[in-house]
Image: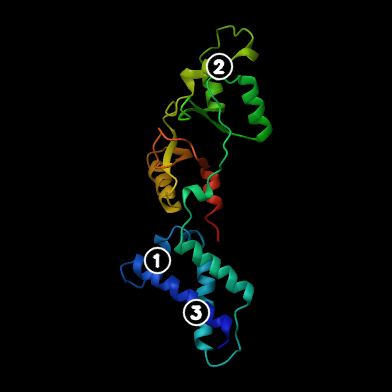
């Protein structure tokens, strides 16, 4: 058996050991796949490489079938992704655009349009997140002020929207604080948990230990998270 095939078997054994450990030494492909957040979304990938393993096992005495170097590298990367799940800090958007209550609203909206930002964290003088400015903030503000004349709107600041930018203003949409070491599987479990309550996590706010009183390290939207599930 050639070196590429040997390496493939070694990687597959790592995955099998991980499977048994996760399933309390029960060997069951379906349970393993369903219990692994990455594999459950890449079943075709798993079945393809399982077939490769079975073919190679029957061809162990000759070299009629050999995995390619490219195929081996793809599998190695996938195994590493499963055995070493990404954490919140690894996938979050860092250097997040943040504003204070004194920021001019026109500047913020122009920035949102130019950079295609959907949620802007609002911080206090200790750099703690105290709210989120987004389209919902604008809509609720104007909906509740339809009969009032807004004089010189270009001079308005974030503070003028204070009543409408709190993190829990919309009971159907959540902004969840999580630790920078939170694994991707835990984030997806949180999304599912809220989904069962007919609620949606709009974004995860990443801090050192998941405390709202800590400096914001980054932000993860549900869309950003799902991009990291494909092998």
Neighbour class for label 1 at 10 Å: few (<14), some, many (≥20)? many
Residue in the picture at 51% in, 71% down = 47
Of mark 2 and mark 3, the one earlier in the sequence is 3
Question: Relative to the observer, which residue lies in front, 207 or 14?
Answer: 207
Q: Position of residue 14 (x, y in %)?
A: 44, 72
Which numbered disc, 3 or 1, marks the residue closer to the eye?
3
* Horizontal and vertical percent position of residue 61: 53, 93
What residue lies at 44% left-to-right and 76% top-to-bottom? 13
Q: Which mark is residue 142?
A: 2
Which tag, 3 or 1, sits closer to the chain's start? 3
Quarter occupied by the C terminus: bottom right
- 186 in relation to 149, above or below: below
3D distance between C-alphas at marks 3 and 1 = 18 Å
SS category of the residue bearing label 1 = helix
Q: What residue would you read off at disc 1?
A: 32
Given residues 199 and 217, the one toward you in this image is: 217
Give the spatial CA distance, label 1 vs label 2.
Answer: 51 Å
- In the picture shown, does residue 49 fall above or below 218? below
């Amino acid at each position: 058996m050639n070196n590429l095939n040997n390496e493939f078997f070694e990687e597959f054994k790592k995955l099998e050991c991980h499977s048994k450990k996760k399933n309390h030494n029960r060997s069951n492909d379906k349970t393993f796949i369903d219990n692994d957040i990455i594999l459950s979304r890449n079943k075709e990938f798993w079945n393809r490489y399982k077939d490769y393993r079975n073919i190679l096992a029957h061809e162990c005495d000759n070299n009629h079938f050999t995995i390619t170097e490219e195929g081996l590298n793809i599998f190695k990367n996938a195994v590493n992704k499963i055995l070493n799940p990404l954490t919140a800090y690894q996938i979050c958007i860092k250097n997040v655009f943040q504003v204070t209550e004194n920021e001019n609203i026109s500047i913020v909206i122009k920035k949102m349009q130019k950079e295609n930002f959907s949620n802007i964290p609002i911080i206090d003088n200790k750099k703690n997140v105290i709210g989120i400015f987004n389209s919902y903030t604008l809509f609720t503000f104007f909906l509740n002020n339809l009969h009032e004349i807004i004089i010189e709107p270009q001079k308005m600041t974030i503070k003028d929207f204070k009543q409408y930018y709190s993190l829990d203003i919309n009971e159907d949409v959540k902004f969840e604080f999580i630790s920078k070491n939170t694994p991707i599987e835990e984030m997806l479990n949180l999304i599912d948990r809220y989904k069962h309550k007919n609620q949606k996590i709009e974004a995860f706010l990443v801090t050192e230990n998941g405390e709202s009183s800590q400096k914001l390290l980054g932000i993860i939207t549900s869309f950003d998270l799902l991009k990291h599930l494909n092998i």
